[in-house]
């Protein structure tokens, strides 16, 4: 997968107006941003653009409006945390991302100043990847910088079409994401372990197939492991399980055998009669799950098997929690494995890369986010990358680099 792209050091920025595609699609509750991680990870790119003498026009989508303005999906609530992330710097706001309102605010911008444009998805041209809409955006600046890895799986105008119209480079966050991801799967230190969890095999079939061809060990947890166990005639009681996926699950296991990828499945499990906080639970060996019980987490023996594989590994890629981690005590397996990963990473023995909304939430809940080598800001884009797919945002930057 060629991921050659220009960076901020490769293009002329002094005195330029830079259109910066960010992903400010952050969680907001009652008009207040509840997790500013994406904003904080964007800030160094803005600082660097300013230091290089550019004026910065920040653009992003927010939520999923249907191509028309929706007051609840305004980007305004992002202004205050963005200002904080930039050390209190003033930021202008344009009530539209194209046209007269945008041009007026952007036209007044001087080098070193920053403006945030209103939600790109208030216009249907954004998601349609319309060239006309991209032209209207391009009219606002002279250089395009894409720092939105987490939206790189969307072939939208501000990500794909726009990159064809202006000199285009990756921002610092985009660069860091691509470097971390390619170091983990394209030319990793071996052995490589992939840790994959989550509820459903059906949503991760492509991911599992791709990963099996790339890694030495695949450890599977979460409810998706139940489907793989069921496919081998192992009783899973009332556990979440995709019975209609049994054949696909068996195909995955034979693919793994063919590709000499060792698969680790749960050997024991924490089970309970229902999924509820603090419910009575017990640890049982796989194969002995009673008919009225649900598997809700991996057990300590499984944690030990995964930990032993990690001890041997040099690289880890992780997506998906290993149990029903939002509901204690079923977070314990995920947390125990996360602690092991953090220890090995801190000791310099493992390069660890994690991504996906639930995985990031589980790491944050365990207070371990900063202990991994790299935690991606991306959800869907991280998954598509793990499926081996070409991301439109990355392809657009590569094409721009080719163009020179
Ligand atoms: C995300 O939050 O995963 C990205 O911003 C993409 O958002 P979308 O799924 O609405 O395109
Ligand atoms: Mg999403």
Image (tube, rainbow, N blue to C red):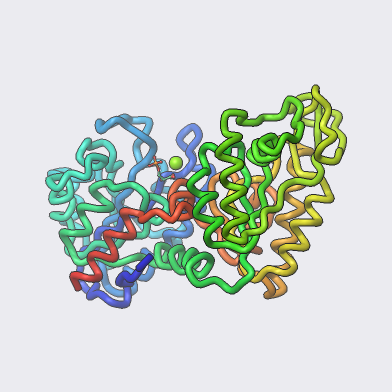
Q: Residue at x 51, y 39 (%)?
A: 203
**Is 20 in front, or is 80?**
20
Please tell me in which quadrant of the rendered image residue 295 appears.
top right
Q: Quadrant of residue 258?
A: bottom right
* 336 relative position to 80: left or right: right
- Comparing 326 with 51, the one in front is 326
Q: Is residue 236 above or below residue 24?
A: above
Q: Position of residue 42 (x, y in %)?
A: 42, 59
Q: Quadrant of the C terminus?
A: bottom left
Front in this rendered view, residue 388 or 138: 388
Location of ligand 2 given as a quarter of the image: top left
Question: Is residue 135 depicted above or below 179 in this figure?
Answer: above
Image position, residue 119 (x, y; %): 30, 41
Left or right, 367 with respect to 47, comes to: right
Across and down, in percent, residue 305 comes to: 78, 56
Residue located at (49% from left, 32% from top)? 30
Instruction: Confirm whether residue 50 shows in the render.
Output: no
The answer to whether residue 338 of the structure is visible from this angle is: yes
How many marks on residues?
Answer: 0
Residue occupying the far top of the picture? 292
Quadrant (top left/top right/bottom left/bottom right) for the N terminus:
bottom left
Q: 311 or 175, which lies in front? A: 311
**At 69% from the left edge and 70% from the top edge, which residue is drawn?**
346
């Amino acid at each position: 997968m060629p991921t050659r792209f220009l960076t901020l050091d490769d293009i002329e920025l002094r005195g330029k107006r830079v259109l910066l595609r960010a992903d400010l699609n952050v969680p907001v509750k009652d008009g207040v941003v509840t997790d500013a991680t994406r904003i904080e990870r964007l800030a160094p790119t803005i600082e660097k653009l300013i230091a290089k003498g550019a004026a910065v026009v920040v653009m992003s989508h927010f939520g999923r409006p249907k191509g028309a303005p929706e007051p609840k999906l305004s980007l305004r609530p992002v202004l205050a945390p963005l200002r904080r992330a930039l050390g209190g710097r003033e930021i202008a706001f344009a009530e539209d991302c194209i046209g007269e309102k945008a041009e007026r605010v952007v036209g007044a911008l001087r080098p070193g100043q920053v403006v945030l444009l209103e939600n790109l998805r208030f216009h249907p041209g954004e998601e349609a990847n319309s060239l006309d809409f991209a032209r209207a955006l391009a009219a606002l600046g002279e250089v395009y910088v894409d720092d939105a890895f987490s939206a790189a799986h969307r072939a939208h105008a501000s990500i794909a079409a726009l990159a064809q119209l202006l000199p285009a480079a990756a921002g610092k966050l985009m660069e860091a994401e691509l470097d971390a991801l390619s170091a983990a799967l394209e030319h990793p230190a071996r052995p490589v372990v992939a840790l994959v969890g989550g509820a459903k095999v059906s949503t991760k079939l492509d991911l599992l197939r791709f990963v099996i061809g790339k890694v030495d060990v695949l450890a599977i947890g979460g409810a998706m492991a139940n489907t793989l166990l069921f496919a081998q005639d192992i009783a899973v009681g009332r556990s979440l399980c995709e019975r209609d996926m049994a054949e696909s699950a068996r195909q995955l296991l034979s693919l793994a055998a063919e590709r000499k990828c060792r698969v680790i499945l749960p050997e024991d499990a924490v089970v309970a009669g229902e999924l509820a906080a603090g419910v009575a639970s017990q640890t049982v060996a796989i194969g002995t799950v009673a008919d009225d019980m649900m598997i809700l987490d991996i057990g300590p023996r499984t944690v030990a098997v995964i930990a032993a594989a990690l001890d041997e590994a040099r690289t880890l890629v992780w997506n998906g929690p290993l149990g029903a981690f939002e509901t204690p005590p079923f977070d314990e397996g995920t947390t125990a494995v996360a602690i092991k990963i953090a220890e090995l990473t801190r000791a310099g023995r493992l390069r660890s890369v994690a991504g996906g909304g639930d995985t990031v939430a589980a790491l944050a809940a365990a207070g371990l986010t900063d202990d991994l080598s790299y935690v991606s800001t991306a959800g869907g884009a991280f998954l598509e990358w793990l499926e081996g797919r070409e991301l439109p945002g990355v392809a657009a930057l590569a094409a721009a680099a080719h163009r020179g």
